[in-house]
Image: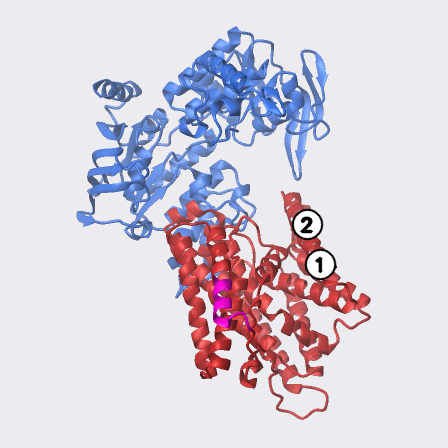
Chain colours: A blue, B red
C-alpha cells in the first residue's frame, strides 16, 4: 500500500501511510487506539471504496481499485473484524458460505455446503459439526469459524483485527498456531493486536502506526525486537514502568462474601459459582485471576444486587454487618459499584452525553424531589472531566464519539460519583491502549489510597500481578488459590489453574 | 485560537439548523398551504379549527413519544382506547345521566386500568409491546362495540361538549376582538421571558456555563412572537379554545417531566441502552409499566376530548389514531430505536400532520390522495432525519 491518505470530516485518519507486506509472511500492525490501524485495513479490504482515499493499493504488483468488499475478496483478500460477523441463529455451515453459497441461487446445495464446511472446520482444527448453531459455540470457536470461512473463499491475504481480544490464553495459543500453519500453506496474514507478547511470538515483521502515520517497520530477522522497543514506537516515548507505584495502606476487612453459590439463569440446575468465600480490605486492590469463563464476572454480578443468576445463596458482610442485596439499587445504596467489562454494551448509553452518563447511577445527588438540577449536573461532569483528564470537546459530547480510554474514564466517573466504598472493576483496561491503561491504573491507585476497596478482575496476568495487593485464583466457579503480592507470579497462577483442572 | 473558535461557532449554528429542521419544514408547509389555499389556512377561524381538529393528535403524540423513547416501542391500541372511552362516556352521560364530572373521573380511571392491564403484560411478563397492544387494539375495539351495541349515542349535554369545542370567556367588551385572549397570551410570554432570564441570571451567579447570548435572544424572540401571533389571531375569532388550555397544560407538564426530572432521565436511559440502565440501578420494568399506564391514561383524555368534539359516541371513533400519533412523533425527530426525541418535536410533528390534513381538505384534495401524500410525507420526513444524522457523523 503506497501513500495512503484517508480523511474523515474534520480528521485526517491516515496521513501518507506506506505498508509493505511480503508474500507468505505474518505482518503485525500495532499502534495505540485511534492510530489508524483499522482504517488502513478497511481501505485495503474495500470497505472504504476506491476514490474515498488517496494513494494506491498494489496486490502482487497489480493496481487495485476496490469498490466493495466483494472486489477485494475476489482477489483473495479477506478481513476478519474484531466484532465477528456471524449470524447467531444460523448454523456454522450456513454462516461459512453466506454470500458465497453452494449450488445455484434457486437451488441451494445443502449437502455440499455442510460437507465442505466440515472439511474446512477440520483444517482449522475445530471439532464441531457444521450444523451446530453459531450461538451455541464460544467466541474462541467462532473466531475459528471465521477463519474457516475465509479459507472457503480461497484466501491469499488474511487480515485479522484483534483476533485474540476476547479469547483466553489457550484459545489464543491455538489461534496463533493456526495462523502459523496457514503461513506454511502460503497464506499471508496481517494481524492487528494490542498483545505485544503474541506479536513477538508470531510475527515476522511489525509495522508501528502512530497518529495516522507509519513510524517504522521492524524485521525480526534483522532488528532486535523487545516489548519495550515496540511500546516506545507506539507512544513515542519510553514508558519506564507499565504500572504506577503505590504504597499500600491496608485497613480492616470492609466487604466479604461467604459461602456464595449461584445457579445459571437459564439452566437452573447448572451451578456457576460454587461455595465461594472472599474478602477485601480497606485500601486494598484485590485481584481475581482466572481463565475466561471461570465465573469471575458471574460471581461479582450476582453479588451486585443479583444482577446475574438464580438460586443465589450465601452471605454478604460490609464493615462487619450482614447485608442483603436483592436489587441493583440496593447495592448502589450500600455503596458498592460494579464497573462492567462490556463498556459499550452494558456500561454506558453511547447516544447520550458525558454528563448524562456520569450522573445516571446516582440521580438523587443532582436532583431534589425528582427534579434535576441540570446546572449542578454539568458542573459535576466538569469536575470529573478535569480530575480524570477525559479528553472531549465538552461535557455535552456524546459518549459514543469518545475513544475507548476516555469512555472507560467516563464509566469510572459514573461509578465514582456514586461514592462507593467497594468498587468492582471488571476488565478495566480491555481494548484500550498502553498510554490510557497507565492513566486508568493511576486512577485505581488513587482510589485505593483514598481508602476504597478495589476488586479487580482481569484476564491479563501481568496487569493483575502489577496492580494487586492480593490475588484470588478462580477456576470453574471455585476459588482455587489465594496469593499475596510477593508470592504471586504468572507461573504460580497458571500452575494453580492447571492443577485444579486436573483435579476436577 | 480565534480561527478555531470561529469554526466552532459555525458548527454550532449548523447543528442548530439541523436541530430545528423539522420546525423549518413546518413553516415551509404552512407557507405552501397558505398560498395554495389562497390565504385561508391562517385566517382566525381556521386557526381555531386547526386547534380543535388536532387536539387529540397532540395528546396522543405526547404519550406515544414516551413509548417510542423506551426503545422504539409503539402502542397500537390507543385508537381503540379512544373509542372505548368515548363509548363509556356516552353510556354514562347520555344513557345513565351520571354527573358529568363523575363520568369524566370514571373514564380517566378506566383509562388507567387499561394501562395497568397492558403495562402488566409488557413490563412484567415481557411480551413485546407490539403484540400486547395489537391484542389491545382488538380487545378494546370489541368492547366499544359491545358497549354501544353497534349504535351511535348522541348528543352530549353542552357542559360536556364545552370541554372540547367551547371557548374561554371574554371579560372585556371590545367589539370583534377578544381582549382576554390577547392578555393571556401576553402574560404567558411575560412569564416565559421572566423565567428564562432568571434562569440565566442564576447560572451567571453560580458561574455555570451558558449557551451563547445571541442564540438565547433569538430563541426568546421567536417563541414570544409565535405565541403572541397565535393569541392575536385567535382573539380575532372567538378567543381561547378551552381545549387549547388542556393541551398547553399537558405539553408543558410532559416537557418538564422528560427534561428536568429523574423519571424523564430514566426514560431516555432505558431507550438508549436498556442493559446499562438496569446496571445503573434503574428499575426498568417499572419504567415500562408506567409508560404504558400513562399512554392509556392520555388515550382516555383524548377519547373524552374527541367524543366531546364529535358530540357523540361512535363505534368506529378513534380508528387509525395510533398512526397519526406515531407519525407525529417520527416527523418530530424521534428515533425509531428509542432514546431520542422530545415533546417539542412531537408537538411540531402533530401540528405538521394537522396542517397537512387541514390544508389538503381546503385545497380540495380527495381523501384517497390525502392518504398517499401523508404516507409519502412521513417517509420523507424520516428519511430526511436519517440523512441529516448520517451527515453529522
Q: Where is residue A47 in the image (x, y as percent from the top left)?
A: 63, 28
On screen, residue B281 versus residue A211, left or right, reads left
Element under label 1? helix
- Pointer 1 indicates a residue of which chain? B
Q: Quadrant of residue B351?
A: bottom right
Element under label 2? helix
**Which of the pair B376/B7 is nearer the observer?**
B376
Q: Quadrant of residue A137?
A: top left
* Distance (Cα) linking label 1 and label 2: 11 Å
Image quarter hosting the N terminus of chain A:
top right
Q: Vertically, is B300 above or below A295?
A: below
Looking at the image, which residue is at 66% across and 29% down?
A48
- Figure label count: 2
Q: Where is residue A248 in the image (x, y as percent from the top left)?
A: 27, 36
Q: Mark 1 vs mark 2: which is more N-terminal?
A: 1
Q: Vertically, is A447 above or below A82?
A: below
Q: Which mark is residue A127?
A: none
Q: Mark 1 points at which residue?
A: B25
* Callout 1 touching callout 2 (CB < 8 Å): yes
- Pointer 2 indicates a residue of which chain? B
Q: Can residue A18 be seen in this view?
A: no
Looking at the image, which residue is at 50% across and 61% down?
B258
Q: What stretch is highlighted in magenta?
A: B140-151
Residue furthest to the bottom: B173
Q: Residue B384 carries which label?
A: 2
**Which of the pair B225/B374 is nearer the observer?**
B374
Amino acid at each position: 500500500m503506497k501513500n495512503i491518505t484517508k480523511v474523515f470530516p474534520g480528521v485526517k485518519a491516515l496521513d501518507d501511510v506506506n505498508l509493505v507486506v511480503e508474500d507468505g509472511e505474518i505482518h503485525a500492525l500495532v499502534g495505540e487506539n485511534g492510530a489508524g490501524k483499522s482504517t488502513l485495513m478497511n481501505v485495503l479490504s474495500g470497505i472504504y471504496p476506491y476514490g474515498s482515499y488517496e494513494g494506491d493499493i498494489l496486490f502482487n504488483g497489480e493496481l487495485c481499485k476496490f469498490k466493495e468488499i466483494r472486489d477485494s475478496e475476489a482477489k483473495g483478500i479477506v478481513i476478519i473484524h474484531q466484532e465477528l460477523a456471524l449470524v447467531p441463529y444460523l448454523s456454522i455451515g450456513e454462516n461459512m458460505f453466506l454470500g458465497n453459497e453452494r449450488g445455484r441461487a434457486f437451488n441451494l446445495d445443502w449437502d455440499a455446503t455442510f460437507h465442505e464446511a466440515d472439511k474446512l472446520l477440520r483444517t482449522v482444527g475445530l471439532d464441531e459439526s457444521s450444523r451446530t448453531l453459531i450461538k451455541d459455540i464460544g467466541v474462541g470457536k467462532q473466531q475459528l469459524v471465521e477463519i474457516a470461512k475465509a479459507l472457503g473463499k480461497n484466501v491469499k491475504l488474511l487480515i485479522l483485527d484483534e483476533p485474540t481480544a476476547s479469547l483466553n490464553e489457550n484459545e489464543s495459543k491455538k489461534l496463533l498456531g493456526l495462523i502459523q500453519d496457514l503461513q506454511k500453506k502460503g497464506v499471508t496474514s496481517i494481524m492487528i493486536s494490542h498483545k505485544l507478547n503474541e506479536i513477538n511470538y508470531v510475527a515476522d515483521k511489525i509495522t508501528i502506526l502512530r497518529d495516522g502515520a507509519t513510524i517504522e517497520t521492524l524485521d525480526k530477522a534483522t532488528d532486535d525486537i523487545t516489548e519495550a522497543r515496540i511500546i516506545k514506537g507506539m507512544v513515542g516515548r519510553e514508558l519506564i514502568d507499565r504500572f504506577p507505584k503505590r504504597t499500600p495502606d491496608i485497613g480492616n476487612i470492609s466487604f466479604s462474601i461467604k459461602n456464595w453459590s449461584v445457579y445459571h439463569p437459564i439452566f437452573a440446575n447448572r451451578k456457576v459459582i460454587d461455595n465461594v468465600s472472599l474478602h477485601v480490605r480497606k485500601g486494598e486492590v484485590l485481584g481475581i485471576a482466572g481463565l475466561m469463563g471461570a465465573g469471575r464476572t458471574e460471581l461479582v454480578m450476582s453479588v451486585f444486587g443479583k444482577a446475574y443468576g438464580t438460586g443465589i445463596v450465601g452471605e454478604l458482610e460490609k464493615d462487619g454487618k450482614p447485608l442483603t442485596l436483592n436489587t441493583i439499587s440496593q447495592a448502589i445504596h450500600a455503596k458498592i459499584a460494579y464497573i462492567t467489562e462490556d463498556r459499550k454494551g452494558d456500561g454506558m448509553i453511547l447516544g447520550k452525553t458525558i454528563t448524562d452518563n456520569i450522573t445516571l447511577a446516582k440521580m438523587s445527588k443532582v436532583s431534589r424531589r425528582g427534579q434535576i438540577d441540570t446546572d449542578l449536573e454539568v458542573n459535576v461532569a466538569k469536575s470529573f472531566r478535569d480530575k480524570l483528564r477525559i479528553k472531549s470537546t465538552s461535557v455535552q459530547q456524546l459518549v459514543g464519539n469518545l475513544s475507548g480510554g476516555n469512555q472507560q474514564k467516563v464509566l469510572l466517573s459514573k461509578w465514582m460519583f456514586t461514592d462507593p466504598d467497594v468498587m468492582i472493576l471488571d476488565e478495566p483496561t480491555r481494548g484500550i491502549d498502553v498510554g490510557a491503561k497507565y492513566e486508568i491504573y493511576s486512577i485505581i491507585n488513587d482510589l485505593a489510597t483514598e481508602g476504597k476497596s478495589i476488586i479487580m478482575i482481569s484476564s491479563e496476568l501481568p496487569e493483575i500481578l502489577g496492580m494487586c495487593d492480593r490475588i484470588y485464583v478462580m477456576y470453574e466457579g471455585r476459588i482455587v488459590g489465594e496469593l499475596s503480592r510477593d508470592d504471586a507470579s504468572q507461573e504460580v497462577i497458571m500452575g494453580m489453574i492447571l492443577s485444579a483442572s486436573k483435579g476436577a | 485560537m480565534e480561527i478555531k473558535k470561529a469554526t466552532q461557532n459555525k458548527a454550532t449554528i449548523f447543528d442548530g439548523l439541523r436541530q430545528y429542521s423539522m420546525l423549518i419544514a413546518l413553516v415551509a408547509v404552512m407557507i405552501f398551504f397558505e398560498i395554495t389555499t389562497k390565504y385561508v389556512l391562517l385566517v382566525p377561524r381556521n386557526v381555531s379549527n386547526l386547534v380543535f381538529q388536532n387536539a387529540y393528535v397532540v395528546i396522543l403524540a405526547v404519550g406515544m413519544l414516551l413509548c417510542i423513547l423506551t426503545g422504539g416501542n409503539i402502542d397500537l391500541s390507543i385508537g381503540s382506547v379512544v373509542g372505548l372511552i368515548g363509548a363509556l362516556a356516552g353510556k354514562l352521560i347520555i344513557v345513565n345521566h351520571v354527573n358529568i364530572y363523575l363520568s369524566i373521573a370514571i373514564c380517566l380511571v378506566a383509562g388507567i386500568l387499561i394501562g395497568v392491564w397492558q403495562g402488566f403484560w409488557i413490563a412484567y411478563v415481557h411480551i413485546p409491546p407490539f403484540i400486547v397492544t395489537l391484542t389491545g387494539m382488538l380487545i378494546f375495539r370489541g368492547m366499544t362495540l359491545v358497549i354501544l351495541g353497534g349504535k351511535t349515542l348522541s348528543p352530549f349535554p353542552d357542559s360536556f361538549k364545552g370541554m372540547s369545542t367551547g371557548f374561554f370567556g371574554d371579560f372585556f367588551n371590545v367589539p370583534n376582538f377578544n381582549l382576554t385572549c390577547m392578555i393571556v397570551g401576553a402574560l404567558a410570554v411575560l412569564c416565559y421571558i421572566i423565567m428564562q432570564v432568571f434562569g440565566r441570571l442564576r447560572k451567571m451567579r453560580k458561574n455555570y456555563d451558558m449557551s451563547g447570548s445571541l442564540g438565547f435572544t433569538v430563541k426568546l424572540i421567536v417563541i414570544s412572537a409565535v405565541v403572541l401571533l397565535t393569541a392575536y389571531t385567535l382573539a380575532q375569532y372567538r378567543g381561547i379554545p378551552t381545549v387549547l388550555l388542556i393541551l398547553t397544560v399537558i405539553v408543558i407538564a410532559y416537557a418538564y417531566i422528560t427534561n428536568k426530572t429523574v423519571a424523564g432521565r430514566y426514560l431516555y436511559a432505558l431507550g438508549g441502552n436498556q442493559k446499562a440502565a438496569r446496571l445503573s440501578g434503574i428499575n426498568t420494568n417499572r419504567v415500562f409499566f408506567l409508560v404504558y399506564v400513562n399512554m392509556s391514561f392520555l388515550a382516555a383524555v383524548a377519547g373524552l376530548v374527541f367524543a366531546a368534539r364529535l358530540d357523540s359516541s361512535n363505534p368506529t371513533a378513534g380508528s387509525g389514531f395510533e398512526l397519526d400519533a406515531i407519525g407525529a412523533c417520527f416527523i418530530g425527530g424521534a428515533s425509531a430505536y428509542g432514546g431520542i426525541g422530545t415533546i417539542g418535536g412531537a408537538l411540531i410533528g402533530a401540528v405538521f400532520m394537522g396542517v397537512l390534513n387541514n390544508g389538503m381538505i381546503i385545497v380540495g384534495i380527495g381523501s384517497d390522495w390525502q392518504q398517499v401524500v401523508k404516507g409519502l410525507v412521513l417517509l420523507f420526513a424520516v428519511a430526511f432525519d436519517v440523512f441529516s444524522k448520517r451527515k453529522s457523523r
